[in-house]
Amino acid sequence: TPGSAISVGNSLAPGDRILTVKCSINSIQWNPEFRQQLDQFINDVNKVTTHAYSFSIYIFLRAFIEYENFYISQYINREFFDEVWLSLTLYVRGARVSARTLERREFIGRYLPDNCRIANYQRIPFRYGQQSSLIEGTKIYTA
């Protein structure tokens, strides 16, 4: 709703919306001095997000094959997709995280080396990756 904060939980609250506006960079009249940095940022986010979609599918397919009682429903949440997105970047991780976050990271990490090798993907250094992962993880979760 206008003027209200968007929830950051596992799902969107009633009335919350994600709005994506597409336009050319030229139309927003970006400061030319920082144009190259903006272009690089957009390309990096797009590359990581594209790989995060396919990596998520890869994780689920492998888990279904490897675990007879794999319950995908416990992984279909924004936090999981945030961590998938972050796993595809190189960033400074905080020292203190919850046990659930560590569990997600361990689960995702089981499949990361094979996925990077198969997809010929190299993790991208990403400053402030956690902020971007919140946005992109939510988009993946709601897609």
Image (cartoon, rainbow, N blue to C red):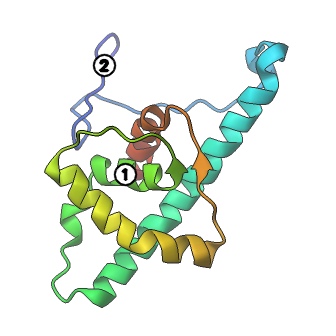
Q: Say whether residue 24 is visible.
A: no
Comes first in the chain, label 1 or label 2: 2
Q: What x and y, as percent, mark residue 29? A: 78, 13
- Image point (84%, 16%), residue name: 32
Tell me the element at label 2: loop
| Residue bearing the label numbered 1 | 83
Dot 2 alpha-carbon crowd within 10 angstroms: few under 14, some 14 to 19, many 20 or more: few
Left or right: residue 136 versus residue 81 is right
- Image point (32%, 89%), residue name: 65
Dot 1 alpha-carbon crowd within 10 angstroms: few under 14, some 14 to 19, many 20 or more: many
Circles 1 and 2: CB atoms closer than 8 Å: no
Tell me the element at label 1: helix
Q: What x and y, as percent, mark residue 51? A: 56, 60
Q: Amino acid at mark 1?
A: Glu
Which mark lies nearer to you, 1 or 2?
A: 1
Q: Amino acid at mark 2?
A: Thr
When asked about the image quadrant of residue 138, the answer is top left
Q: What x and y, as percent, mark residue 126? A: 57, 40
| Residue bearing the label numbered 2 | 1
Left or right: residue 107 versus residue 47 is left
Q: CA distance from mark 1 to mark 2?
A: 28 Å
